[in-house]
Image (tube, rainbow, N blue to C red):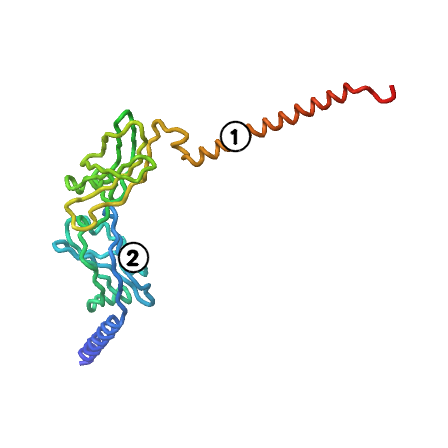
Amino acid sequence: MLRAHAGFRALLLGALLWRLAAAGNLELPTAVNVTWSSINFKTILQWQPKPSGYFYTVEIHGQTSDTQKKCILTTETECDVTDALRNVKETYTAHILSVQSAGMDNFEEPPFASSEKFTPYNQTILGKPEIQNYTQKDSKLNIVFQDPLTPYMFLNGSFQSIRDIFKHDLEYKLYYWKDQSSGKKEATTKSNTFEISVDNTNNYCFYIEATIPSRRENRTGQESMVFCTSVGRTILDEYGAEVFIIIAVIAIAVITLAIVLSVILCKRKKAKAAREKEPLNGI
């Protein structure tokens, strides 16, 4: 009888604790402003506010994949979820759970905020291509560049590039123009090289960006650094007409000063020679 009574009290106490835990979880604030930030498939989930007296746990839900937990019991407001999005063509939703301790979310699902849907293949931003080499010879401008790398690896440990993932969907655009001119031309390639016909009497500047024409959003990526060729560049091309004029004015001033000084010295010598030829007074 005593054992049954003790068991009933334990059951009653457990139910009471369960209700208190559930009530405590419902009072916890939920995250707001949940956003995805992804470049070359490295994906960071961000939200607000900074927690006080509770923690966050991130759950990644795919349409066909199992739910994955990331950044468990964190006090941060961002989480690197790259590893949970390896199936880049899947569409994911993130839940930012608000929890008080390691055990409380076992009683009942804690309050959470949901992100917008995210498909890495369609939405990650394409990073900057790296220009490896460029030459301008005669009437040809040749450019060699490298695909941006992703955080994902092959079995041999080397990193996959965006080309390894996008394959034939990936293109690159080249924008080029005559140095000190504003008129741009463009060209497209599916390889890692450009060969462009140019005017061999002019230098050219250019940059490259990756593009996925099949996308509805984020079609074009980040721009590479701007480079300029220097074939046949003169001082006037390099520094501009204004600096050339300043140099000419300075040169004329120096020559004029030299002439004036020469004239003054010459007059002084003549005056000294005339004084030496005059007879001495009293002789």
Against 178, is 117 above or below? below
Q: Nearer the viewer, residue 140 or 162?
A: 140
Q: Nearer the viewer, residue 221 or 110?
A: 221
User: In screen coordinates, is 185 left or right of 249?
Assistant: left
x then y, percent, for residue 38: 25, 50
x then y, percent, for residue 140: 25, 27
x then y, percent, for residue 134: 29, 31
Q: Return the disc, 2 or 1, that comes first in the chain's sequence.
A: 2
**Amino acid type, mark 1:** Ile
User: In screen coordinates, is 93 left or right of 178?
Assistant: left
x then y, percent, for residue 1: 17, 81
Kindly identify which numbered label has been placed on residue 252.
1
Mark 2 lies on a secondary structure that is: strand
Q: Nearer the viewer, residue 75 or 149?
A: 149
Q: Name the residue at 28% across, 67% down.
A: 100
**To which residue does mark 2 refer?**
78
